[in-house]
Amino acid sequence: MGKINSFDKIKKFRTMSNRELSHIIQSNLWYTPVIYVFISFLLVGAALTADYQYELGKNMITIYAVDYSLTQAIVGTLTAATLTLTTFTFNLVLVVFTTFSGQFSPRMLKNFIASKATQRVLGIFTASFFYMLLCYLFLNKDLAQYYFAVPVLATIIAALSIGTFVFFIHHAVNWLQVNQMTYDMKKEALSIVKSTLEDEMDPYKVKDISTIKGPISESKEFTITARKSGYIQLVDYITMVNEAQKDGIVIRLEYTIGSYVFESTPILSYWKKNAKEIDELKYLSLFSIKRRQSEVQDIEFSINKLVEVAIRSIGNYDPKTATNAIYQIGEVLASISRKSNFSNYLIDENNNLRVILQERDFNHYLYHGFGYIRHYAKENVIVATEILKVLALMAKSLNPRDYKAIWEFGVFTASGFENLFLFKLDHQQFHHALSNLAVSTKHEKEYEEFLKQRKKIGLNTNSTKPE
């Protein structure tokens, strides 16, 4: 049974896409330390060979040669010291980080663990311990009375571990700063936008369905059901388009990345023009369904990390952190607007329709980015004002196609806050931000109408007119 499970795991890794495999390697803590431990094995072999076979310690002058007793004492002491240093460092950081992640978002811990700096530090600590341990194990007084390579390498590695300890504390302190944390989350989201929307899907999207050759098939519809429940982590769109072209079918995805599906839930439908049998398992293999969400292709899940930081900051009465997260979300949404073609039709190289996606437009991402924050900030005029300021800033770099969406979202955000102004300055800042949004989105007339409606219902606007 164990052999079968091992074979299934190996087979699973072989069938993974490069992106999924890369993500798994980066998010697992064992990969980098294993490489470093392997290097430590090579260093142990080289050191012992130099001292045993080539008698490096015996051939050295007396000042550089280290006798067996001193070598054993050095290596034994450094073995315990390295293990203690490693345990102390990570226990301390994980306690602090667990508290910090509970304050903002539990998903931050995975980001910290997946960072290259963290994995390399753990790799150096682990490799140092294994070097000391193996050298201590293989020290033999009968084979050599004097040593050079073993104690010298042990001393150098111990010094490297101390330097790594200092670097790791510096790295952890910098990473735990809110600005750096949200900046890293934003970079992750932007990379997903580029790889998923811009590089992978946009080359196959078509804006105008009338340019597609032939009508959408009206033949009998077939469905393919999921074989297990979980979140859709990955979809191989490129292979799906190519396979659909070979089979002469049109596919409609019933769910999108990040959706949760049950076992036996129809996951896609397809139409075919001939009686050719379709290998449904081939298309199921293009979906990666797992028990948890992943950031590999899921843009909304990546944005949601920043949303969680903003919401928890509002609950913890930390408006500065909330504002920082809101601006980072705004930059991600602006990038989506500029770079994405929101068509839900994928075509093949012959301009034939092959895949129909779930409809996603800028309104969808805008709501998932700011909708929840707006809800939790419904009694916080300052945070709501910052949302309007971010919307106005976004509008200066958005695709004009999305001006209406962002203006309407701004109006909905502005509605309902009139009775919460405690000071005149709150009122001025709020309406000034909405005025800037109107100018950026070319909705000055709509802004004037909005002010007139507020006056009709008896609210004092003292508005700022669009310049």
Image (cartoon, rainbow, N blue to C red):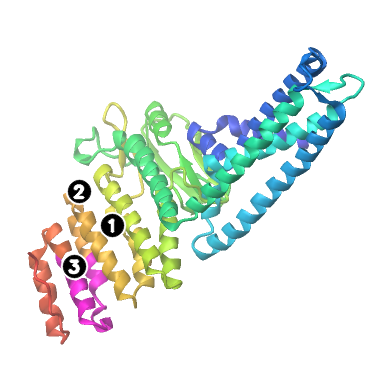
Residue placed at 17% from the left, 69% from the top? 432
Q: Which residue is mark 1?
A: 363
The secondary element bearing badge 3 is classed as: helix
Q: Position of residue 74 (x, y in %)?
A: 79, 35
Task: Give the answer, above or below, for where 455 lies relative to 257.
Answer: below
From the viewer's perspective, tell me whether residue 434 is left or right of residue 202. Answer: left
Position above or below: 53 against 465? above
Q: Residues within 10 Å of mark 2 (few under 14, many from 20)?
A: some
Q: Which residue is mark 2?
A: 399
Q: Which residue is mark 3?
A: 434
First in sequence: mark 2 or mark 1?
A: 1
Residue extending farthest to the bottom is 458
Q: Earlier in the sequence, mark 1 or mark 3?
A: 1
What is the distance, in whole Å, between disc 2 and disc 1 at their CAs?
A: 13 Å
Front: mark 1 or 3: 3
Local packing at callout 3 (Cα closer than 10 Å; few below 14, some 14-19, many 20+) is many
Q: Amino acid at mark 2?
A: Asn
Q: Residue at x 64, y 39 (%)?
A: 161
The question of residue 366 being in magenta is answered with no
Camera-side residue: 285 or 317?
317
- SS for dot 2: loop
Q: CA distance from mark 1 to mark 3?
A: 18 Å
Magenta part of the chain: 410-435
Helix, strand or loop for the magenta stretch, by majority: helix
Residue 79 lies, in percent from the top left, at 77, 39
Quadrant of the rendering where the C terminus is positioned: bottom left
